[in-house]
Amino acid sequence: MKFRIVYNAWWMRRGWGMVFWSWMWFGLKESEVSDRHYRHELQHCYQVKRKGRLWFLISYALLWLRHGAFWGGYRNHPYEVEARQHQDNPLTAEEIAWRERRRITL
């Protein structure tokens, strides 16, 4: 499974990151994305690999609704909780190489 990393996405709010289908999007310049932020989004890539692209999207949306989409659903979302639990883990040499190439291969 492959993902392309895109920095400084004009349509995203500054500081946001998102994994959608085959892309990891950031609303920041490459030099502004911390390892922590990258690791958080990378964890979503691992989730996509485990669940499959389509089921990840469907289950993410359903869980977002279930956990209160309009009253803190993002904070309590199981996929987000998991990503926050991993965001302080150090990056492996392979994950650093992916970041430098702007391509992730899982």
Image: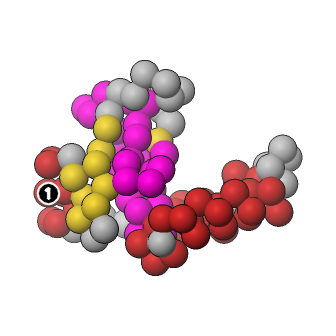
Indicate the position of residue 44 as horizontal and vertical percent values: 47, 61
Q: Is residue 10 above or below residue 54?
A: above
- Residue at the bottom extreme, as displayed: 50
- Residue at the front extreme, as displayed: 54
**Residue at the image position 66 percent from the left and 67 percent from the top:** 59
**Residue at the image position 59 percent from the left and 60 percent from the top:** 57
Indicate the position of residue 62 as horizontal and vertical percent values: 74, 62
- Would you say residue 35 is visible in this rendering? no
**Residue at the image position 54 percent from the left and 65 percent from the top:** 54
Q: Is residue 73 above or below residue 47?
A: above
Q: In what quadrant of the picture does the C terminus appear?
A: bottom left
Judging by the rendered image, the residue that carries numbered circle 1 is 97
**Residue at the image position 65 percent from the left and 63 percent from the top:** 58
Q: In what quadrant of the picture does the N terminus appear?
A: bottom left
- Say whether residue 22 is magenta: yes
Type of amino acid at the residue the image marks with label 1: Ala
- Would you say residue 59 is visible in this rendering? yes
Q: Is residue 11 above or below residue 87?
A: above
- Coloring basis for residues: secondary structure
Q: Which residues are magenta?
A: 18-47
Question: In the figure, residue 105 lies in which quadrant?
Answer: bottom left
Indicate the position of residue 23 as horizontal and vertical percent values: 37, 48
